[in-house]
């Protein structure tokens, strides 16, 4: 019932009530997500029956606990927490210890026998209430940007200094009592409101604050990034308080049924003695490990829970095993031990990084806990990117001095320039800078900046702090609890323990798998997937389930090899023009330019003849690597003027070679200028204007394939014509192909060269005219980059100017160049496939736009019956997994 009760509420109810569990959960009740929706639909009013229902439920809790809410002698205290359908760790608000006032505190003192504890609970309530309910939910702008929480925190620090103590727990009951008074006065002074003494008002204030926090800045930001719908709303869980801070026989902790950092099947967690839950996640004190396995460099000298409270640890361990068996997935659990008695406060499916997701899925399948389908569905395809994550070259890393060490909260290597605030991270990243966000605290307010950063480094917090959870969810490199550095965020620098000063904008390198920080920028290298057994096991299952092929977009033997290693079954797009870019392209580019600048057909043909050797060489190399798997070679696509040289020396060289003056050359260049080149003289139009260009390329393809065949190597080229809009263009080019085919057979003395002839569908008209296009084509490959551009009329190259605003205003659900716009462009694709197959039922259909590597788009392609998707080499594993998920 997660939709109604939220994740937390549903799991609390299940832990408490399910016949297989019946775990010790403090009694409580859940106000449903429907109330939240009602609240926002009705000008922040509650349904009229709500108060009565809360009162009735509260009465039941009172009965179960044997205490009374607001009672002076034996007061019941309540917590109020959020809980959306999908967990949003730390993004919404919580109020604890509700029910305390100047009178009920006496009951708590009498009952706990601990005045210090009672006043500590009270001062926490006043702090949280002022911050969360009065200031945040009340929509108050903190004076001079300093919130009431910070003002109170600073006062707390001052008092600790005055008393000469380091920890909150070292303050006396009297100190805390005074603080309660002071905090109330500070509330009045800064927020112009009294702290409410009536428990009922506190409770309703807390409930309202949780609902209000659904629309808090950081919750909205998180929902936008995680694509959680605004309409879902949050539930509110009202639960009897249990105390992890009732002295040294009490504690609180967070644990995972398996290690979320590397996926190992080992119980992993942290706890704090004499503390409340928020202390662990907020990273205020360094938590201790629950067992030997959970120790790290920071906590190695701290006592484990297993040693400290062996009986309770045993019970907890037994519970975690039952929970994992029950939910059949890794659980993230919160527990509290109050005076030796264990309580479960929460359990939910634990967030994990890609590496652990793959390991857990493969392991749980092997253990027989889940079936193959579930294992495949467990891993988010995008998380696979993390397995391909770059790491530092270990040999080079060894030679660099570690300037600081923290906890390895999110794996992988990252390099970037240091910034000290979320705002700066966002601003720098928007200018294309790679940044590392360095913060003291792990505040969820930083979510936007964290998202935009290459990595996050914090001085406080543990593996379970907010920053760690959030970063892990995103597969981001993250180091927390790096207490060896001290941050001066106002002056924008930090100092290492050796006194090294790192300023804003300085480069640092982070190894999130080890928790080490280096000065400068270390080179990153790729990882060896072959060593990852879990990945191999999972992908074996994936290949059994997927029905659609996965190819790659690649144009060099090196890229093709890389893609084959990732599991590509062919090349879906070989962009011929890429041989004119980058390394080793000088000579072919020069010849291409010579061809472009030629004035007569004769001149052009002689340049093309010279170019032929290079084109054939490159095509042959790729066909050879693919060993008979299909290689779709697209004929020259871009407008010719893209290749015109701009520097003077190159122009002079060209004018000499062609034997024409510079002014004539410049005139020819000018003639190539187009106002709208994307819709200009490109794609098939080049082949129509200059059939000799098509002829040269087709000859190179056939000769390459024919020669390989003679050498005993299988080759299967697919000739693809780009930017077509109708059948006649295709027929025109086919005539050239047929002629060259016959000539090549004769030249090489072979009987047959297997090949296919097809086209890209990237103009809306082509999709609509697919029935007649299929009369000539053996295959279609949807070029969804151009198809999206031409369907929306959004320039691929200029979208940055207006898309952010569209996304902000929610005029579009996402960038249509990243994930197929299924209801618009998707309709055109559907029409294209249907009409094409009507003419030619066995028409081969694929996609080669960037969308071929986007998991959602891959699933769409499967749903409309495509034969394959094609994407860049590094996206191949993602496409394979998405294809398998689509087939389940
Ligand atoms: C496309 O348009 O989707 C495509 C693959 O071609 P290009 O990106 O080269 O225009
Ligand atoms: Mg295109």
Image (spheres, rainbow, N blue to C red):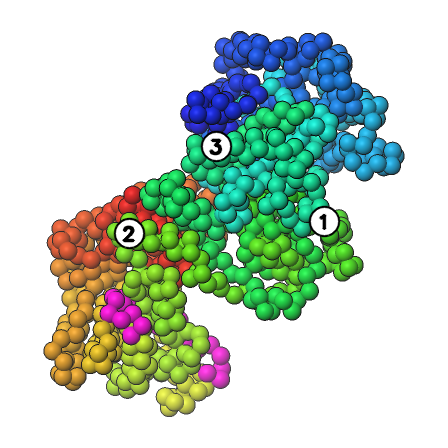
Residue at the (87%, 36%) spot, across then down: 164
Judging by the rendered image, the residue that carries numbered circle 2 is: 544
Q: Are marks 2 and 1 in contact (CB under 8 Å)?
A: no
Task: Give the extent of the magenta segment.
Answer: 624-650
Where 563 falls versus 11 (above or below)? below
Determine whether, in the image, residue 512 is placed left or right of residue 322: right
Q: Nearer the viewer, mark 2 or mark 1?
A: 2
Q: Quadrant location of the C terminus? A: top left
SS type, badge 1: loop
Residue at the (74%, 50%) spot, across then down: 487
Judging by the rendered image, the residue that carries numbered circle 3 is: 323
Asked whether residue 397 is drawn in magenta, I would say no
The answer to which quarter of the image holds residue 468 is top right
Q: 10 Å neighbourhood of mark 3: few (<14), some, or many (≥20)?
A: many
Asked whether residue 642 is drawn in magenta, I would say yes
In front: 22, or 693? Answer: 22
In front: 785, or 51? Answer: 51
Q: Position of residue 61 (x, y in %)?
A: 57, 13
Q: Nearer the viewer, mark 3 or mark 1?
A: 3
SS type, badge 2: helix
Q: Quadrant location of the N terminus? A: top left
Q: Is residue 58 visible?
A: no
Q: Nearer the viewer, mark 3 or mark 2?
A: 3
Looking at the image, tell me whether mark 2 or mark 1 is earlier in sequence order.
1
In front: 490, or 285? Answer: 285
Q: Is residue 575 visible?
A: yes
Judging by the rendered image, the residue that carries numbered circle 1 is: 483
């Amino acid at each position: 019932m997660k939709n109604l009760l939220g994740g937390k509420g549903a799991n609390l109810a299940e832990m408490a009530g399910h016949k297989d569990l019946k775990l010790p959960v403090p009694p409580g009740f859940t106000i449903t997500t429907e109330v939240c929706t009602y609240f926002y639909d009705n000008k922040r009013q509650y349904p009229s029956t709500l108060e009565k229902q809360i009162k009735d439920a509260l009465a039941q809790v009172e009965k179960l606990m044997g205490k009374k809410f607001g009672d002076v002698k034996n007061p019941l205290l309540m917590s109020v927490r959020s809980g959306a359908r999908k967990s949003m760790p730390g993004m919404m608000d919580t109020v604890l210890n509700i029910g305390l006032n100047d009178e009920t505190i006496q009951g708590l003192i009498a009952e706990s026998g601990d005045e210090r504890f009672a006043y500590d609970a009270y001062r926490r309530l006043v702090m949280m209430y002022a911050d969360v309910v009065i200031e945040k939910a009340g929509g108050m702008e903190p004076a001079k940007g300093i919130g009431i929480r910070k003002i109170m925190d600073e006062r707390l620090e001052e008092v600790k200094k005055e008393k000469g103590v380091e920890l909150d727990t070292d303050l006396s009951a009297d100190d805390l009592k005074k603080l309660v008074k002071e905090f109330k006065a500070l509330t009045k002074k800064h927020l112009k409101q009294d702290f409410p003494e009536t428990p009922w008002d506190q409770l309703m204030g807390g409930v309202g604050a949780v609902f209000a926090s659904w629309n808090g800045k950081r919750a909205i930001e998180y929902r936008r990034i995680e694509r959680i719908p605004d309409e879902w709303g949050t539930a509110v869980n009202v639960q009897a308080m249990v105390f992890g801070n009732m002295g040294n026989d009490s504690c609180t902790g967070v644990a995972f049924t398996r290690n979320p950092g590397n996926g190992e099947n080992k119980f992993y967690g942290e706890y704090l003695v004499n503390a409340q839950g928020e202390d662990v996640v907020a990273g205020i004190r360094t938590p201790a490990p629950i067992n030997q396995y959970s120790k790290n460099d920071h906590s190695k000298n701290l006592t484990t829970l297993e040693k400290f409270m062996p009986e309770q640890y045993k019970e907890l361990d037994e519970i975690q095993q039952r929970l994992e068996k029950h939910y059949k997935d890794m659980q993230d659990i919160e527990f509290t031990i109050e005076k030796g008695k264990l309580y479960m406060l929460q359990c939910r499916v634990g967030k994990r990084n890609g590496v652990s997701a793959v390991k857990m899925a493969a392991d749980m399948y092997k253990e027989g806990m889940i079936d193959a389908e579930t294992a495949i569905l467990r891993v988010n395809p995008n998380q696979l990117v993390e397995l391909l994550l770059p790491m530092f070259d270990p040999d080079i890393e060894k030679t660099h001095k570690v300037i600081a060490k923290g906890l390895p909260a999110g794996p992988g290597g990252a390099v970037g320039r240091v910034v000290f605030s979320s705002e700066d991270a966002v601003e720098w990243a928007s200018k294309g800078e790679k940044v590392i966000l360095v913060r003291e605290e792990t505040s969820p307010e930083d979510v936007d900046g964290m998202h935009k950063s290459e990595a996050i480094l914090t001085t406080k917090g543990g593996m379970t702090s907010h920053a760690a959870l959030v970063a892990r969810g995103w597969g981001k490199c993250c180091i927390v609890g790096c207490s060896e550095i001290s941050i001066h965020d106002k002056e924008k620098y930090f100092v290492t323990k050796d006194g090294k000063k790192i300023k804003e904008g300085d480069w640092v390198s982070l190894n999130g798998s080890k928790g080490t920080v280096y000065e400068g920028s270390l080179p990153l290298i790729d990882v060896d997937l072959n060593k990852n057994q879990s990945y191999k096991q999972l992908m074996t299952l994936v290949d059994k389930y997927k029905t659609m092929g996965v190819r790659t977009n690649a144009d060099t033997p090196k890229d093709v090899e890389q893609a084959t290693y990732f599991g590509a079954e062919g090349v879906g797009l070989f962009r011929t023009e890429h041989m004119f870019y980058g390394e080793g392209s000088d000579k072919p580019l020069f010849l291409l330019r010579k061809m472009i600048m030629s004035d007569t057909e004769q001149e052009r043909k002689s340049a093309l003849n010279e170019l032929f050797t290079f084109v054939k060489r490159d095509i042959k190399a790729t066909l050879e690597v693919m060993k008979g798997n299909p290689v779709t070679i697209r004929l020259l696509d871009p407008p010719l003027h893209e290749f015109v040289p701009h520097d003077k020396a190159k122009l002079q060289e060209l004018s000499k070679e062609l034997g024409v003056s510079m002014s004539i050359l410049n005139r020819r260049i000018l003639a190539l200028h187009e106002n709208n080149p994307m819709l200009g003289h490109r794609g098939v139009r080049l082949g129509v204007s200059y059939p000799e260009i098509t002829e040269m390329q087709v000859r190179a393809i056939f000769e390459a394939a024919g020669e390989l065949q003679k050498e005993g190597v299988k080759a299967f080229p697919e000739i693809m014509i780009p930017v077509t809009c109708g059948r006649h263009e295709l027929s025109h080019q086919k005539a050239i192909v047929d002629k060259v085919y016959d000539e090549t057979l004769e030249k090489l003395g072979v009987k047959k060269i297997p090949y296919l002839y097809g086209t890209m569908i990237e103009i809306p008209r082509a999709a609509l005219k697919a029935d007649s296009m299929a009369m000539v084509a053996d295959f279609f490959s949807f070029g969804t980059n151009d198809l999206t551009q031409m369907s929306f009329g959004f320039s691929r190259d200029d979208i940055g100017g207006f898309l952010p605003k569209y996304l902000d205003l929610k005029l579009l659900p996402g960038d249509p160049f990243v994930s197929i716009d299924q209801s618009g462009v998707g309709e055109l694709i559907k029409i294209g496939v249907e009409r094409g197959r009507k003419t030619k039922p066995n028409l081969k259909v694929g996609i080669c736009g960037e969308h071929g590597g986007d998991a959602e788009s891959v699933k769409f392609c499967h749903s409309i019956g495509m034969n394959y998707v094609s994407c860049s080499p590094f996206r191949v594993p993602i496409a394979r997994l998405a294809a398998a998920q689509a087939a389940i």
